[in-house]
Image (tube, grey):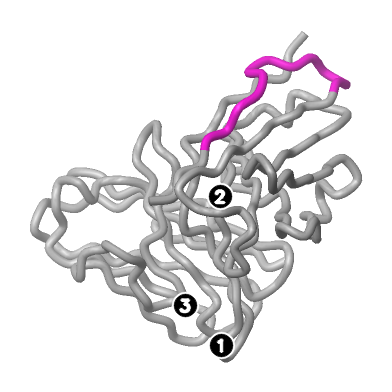
Amino acid sequence: QVQLQESGPGLVKPSQTLSLTCTVSGGSIRSSSYYWSWIRQSAGKGLEWIGLIYSSGTTNYNPSLKSRVTLSVDTSKNQFSLKLSSLTAADTAVYYCARTRWGRNSSWYHYFDYWGQGTLVTVSS
Amino acid sequence: EIVMTQSPATLSVSPGERATLSCRASQSFSSTLAWYQQKPGQAPRLLIYGASTRATGIPARFSGSESGTEFTLTINSLQSEDFAVYYCQQYNNWPFTFGPGTKVDFK
């Protein structure tokens, strides 16, 4: 059974950069069937997809956050990471990492079949 | 960006009854929709993908359907563990987007 676990600081100051890591266990991050996503959830904006990364390092970002987001992957550690810069209070949210099943039948598909438990990040001075 | 809306915001149901949840998209697409269940303090859990295919381990009382731009999640014979918030998510276009959720609570 695959498991994902987020780690990182729970409190970050405004204007700083948030760094979170997701460790994958019970499966390989190199699997060709999956991308790896970050999703956040706040009271104000609900669930918001941030971006995804493939084991090769290929990425796709939500345009609303693209200028501030960087995703990276470390296949040797079975981990992928999120950096979000220029933080404001609006970035306060629970951040989830999620395995993203992808492929194509009649159309492309990308859905989130396993999620981490989430980590609350508060942006405050 | 495709905007997803869900109705109702809250649905009050008694155990054993049927719950019908609706999800609409701002653009037309077919099948590229998933449903998730979220309980307090937990991450969302995948229920349905491809609009109507149950994910592994999901009971048969959960079913999904689509008609035009409207997608429906039906929960037959609601069990106590089904009281939760349900979200739809489209993956037809980038960026992927979620609906605001429907809370299913006790009547």
Span shown in magenta: A5-16
The x and y percentages for residue A76 are 69, 44
Q: Nearer the viewer, mark 3 or mark 2?
A: 2
Note whether residue A59 is visible. no
Q: Is residue A45 visible?
A: yes
The residue located at (72%, 62%) in the rendering is B95
The residue marked by circle 2 belongs to what chain? A
Q: In the image, B5: left or right of A122?
A: left
Give the letter of the chain under mark 3: B
Q: Residues within 10 Å of mark 2 (few under 14, many from 20)?
A: many
- Identify residue for label 3: B50
User: Tag 2's secondary structure?
Assistant: strand
- What residue is at 80 percent from the left and 56 percent from the top? A57
Label placed on residue A105: 1
Q: Are marks 1 and 2 on the same chain?
A: yes
The mark tally for this picture is 3
**What amino acid type should be assigned to the residue bearing mark 2?**
Ala
- Counting from the top left corner in percent of width and height, residue A32 is at 62, 68
| Residue, disc 2 | A98
- Percent position (x, y) of residue A87? 82, 27
Judge left or right: residue A11 versus residue B22. right
Instruction: Report the Cα–Cα distance between label 3 and label 1.
Output: 10 Å
In space, the residues marked 3 and 2 are separated at their CA atoms by 18 Å
Q: Nearer the viewer, residue A2 or A16?
A: A2
Type of the residue with mark 3? Gly
Q: Nearer the viewer, residue A47 or A4?
A: A4
